Image (cartoon, grey):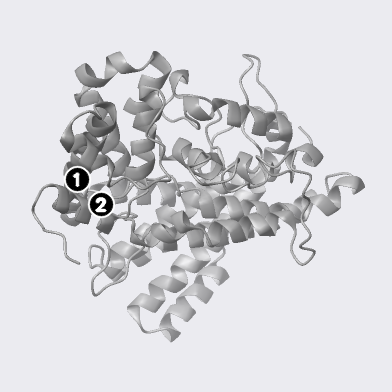
């Protein structure tokens, strides 16, 4: 693979419009960033759960703040890798390579836009709904389509959200550059591949093929596309943020003590010099506020991980550019960093992700999403009843509820997965008659 193809700035869906940008104050990739950050789906992330229920008196991360932080870390990773690339690439590529930090940052902004409400359990709730109702749906779709539904993926939904032509919209969706779109697809294969996650639905298979061909993504020996190299940086930014930030949130909520949290973060520096550790200890003496102490430690841990993930990208550069699969950069850590990250992962499962409040929001999400999917899917699949006609009037006009059974179901998934936690709850209560509408 080569960077001139990989950093293709052609906008998906606008290949034949003959309308080049006249905005000389921004690069094409800066325009991608701006299109994402000003979009409605991105704004809706502010009311979507990350891990903990949306905040009351204590503010914890939601999908929006998480995405902004991932974008910031992604930009840092891009800058760090760029410094190394300038010394290891041809002169003709150098100017184009300067766009890498912006491309990674934009892709990071969009990486969670396809996720449904109620945190990670939202995806599982959608999968469970179709699995539990196999007798109803299995006969309506083919094997590939059934895999898409029963293994619903927020990753694949993000690509659909950004490229699909919803009613009243332009061909190509948000018309982002091929380079940014390719950098979002962490799993460049369909649901039928058999792996745990996948990157695109059957409906977007042609879309991904176009993006892959335009960016010159390599194929492996089996003829399957490999990852775009910048995917590794987007993935690393996400891994760094959610692993490290979830611990800080748990501290703010009192799930972890200050001493426990400090110990978890300080473990990343066990291999550092005594002088470095003394410098950290001195800062902790100067900063007496516990939350600020943890914020300081969190910041220097992230900085350390950015530095080392960038180095790991460079160490594996030849394999990455050849399309050879490697483990996520965060999983290639060694020494104290690996041990510290492993400890955090184990503790997060035991004391954070299984905390009562997290489980409560997950259970609520299962009930709400399964009910909404049942009501709206049945309405578009059986539109002849009076009740179905009433229900379909609640579906916004941008969602096309015609076509094949698969396309009708996907339109409902577009609608429901795009809801915020609050809107999903309000819609559930209204349809169930728990609340009555007001003017």
At 29% across and 43% down in the image, what residue appears? 122
**Place of residue 349 in the rendered image (x, y in percent of width and height, measured from the top left):** 28, 46
Residues at discs 2 and 1 in contact (Cβ within 8 Å):
yes
Which of 319 and 185 lies nearest the eye of the viewer?
185
Q: Is residue 43 left or right of residue 98?
A: left
- The numbered disc on residue 368 is 1
Query: Callout 2: helix, strand or loop?
Result: helix
Is 427 placed above or below 160 here?
below
**Place of residue 87 in the rendered image (x, y in percent of width and height, measured from the top left):** 84, 50
Is 174 placed above or below 291 here?
above
Q: Is residue 246 left or right of residue 296?
A: left
Residue that mark 2 sits on: 424
Q: Quadrant of the N terminus?
A: top right
Residue 308, visible in the rendered structure: no
Estimate the spatial distance between the alpha carbons at disc 2 and disc 1, rounded to whole Å: 7 Å
Q: Is residue 126 left or right of residue 204?
A: left
Is 121 placed above or below 109 here?
above
What is the residue that sits farthest to the left in this orientation? 434
């Amino acid at each position: 693979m080569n960077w001139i193809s990989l950093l293709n700035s052609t906008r998906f869906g606008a290949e034949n419009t003959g309308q080049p940008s006249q905005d000389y104050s921004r690069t094409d990739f800066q325009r991608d960033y701006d299109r994402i950050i000003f979009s409605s789906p991105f704004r809706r992330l502010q009311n979507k759960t990350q891990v903990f229920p949306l905040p009351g008196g204590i503010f914890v991360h939601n999908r929006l703040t998480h995405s902004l932080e991932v974008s910031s870390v992604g930009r840092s990773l891009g800058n760090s890798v760029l410094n190394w690339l300038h010394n290891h690439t041809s002169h003709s590529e150098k100017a184009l390579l300067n766009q890498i930090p912006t491309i990674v940052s934009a892709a990071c902004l969009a990486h969670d836009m396809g996720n449904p409400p109620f945190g990670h359990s939202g995806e599982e709730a959608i999968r469970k709904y179709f699995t539990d109702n196999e007798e109803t749906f299995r006969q309506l779709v083919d094997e590939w389509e059934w895999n898409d539904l029963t293994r619903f993926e927020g990753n694949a939904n993000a690509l659909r959200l950004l490229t699909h032509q919803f009613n009243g919209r332009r061909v190509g969706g948000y018309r982002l550059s091929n380079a940014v779109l390719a950098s979002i697809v962490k799993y460049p294969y369909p649901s039928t591949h058999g792996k745990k996650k996948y990157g695109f639905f059957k409906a977007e298979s042609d879309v991904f093929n176009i993006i892959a061909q335009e960016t010159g993504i390599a194929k492996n020996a089996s003829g399957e596309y490999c990852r775009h190299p910048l995917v590794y940086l987007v993935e690393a930014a996400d891994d760094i943020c959610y692993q490290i930030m979830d611990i800080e949130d748990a501290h703010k909520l009192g799930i972890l003590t200050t001493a426990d949290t400090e110990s978890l973060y300080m473990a990343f520096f066990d291999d550092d010099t005594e002088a470095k550790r003394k410098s950290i200890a001195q800062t902790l003496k100067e900063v007496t506020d516990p939350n600020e102490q943890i914020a300081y430690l969190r910041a220097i841990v992230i900085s350390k991980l950015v530095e080392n993930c960038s180095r790991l990208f460079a160490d594996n550069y030849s394999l990455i550019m050849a399309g050879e699969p490697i483990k996520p950069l965060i999983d290639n850590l060694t020494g104290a960093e690996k041990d510290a990250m492993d400890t955090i992962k184990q503790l997060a499962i035991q004391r954070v992700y299984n905390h009562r409040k997290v489980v409560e929001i997950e259970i609520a999400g299962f009930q709400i999403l399964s009910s909404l999917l049942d009501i709206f899917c049945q309405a578009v699949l059986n539109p002849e009843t009076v009740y179905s006609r009433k229900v379909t009037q609640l579906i916004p006009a941008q969602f096309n509820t015609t076509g094949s059974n698969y396309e009708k179901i996907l339109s409902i998934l577009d609608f429901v997965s795009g809801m915020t936690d609050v809107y999903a709850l309000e819609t559930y209560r209204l349809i169930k008659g728990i609340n009555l509408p007001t003017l």
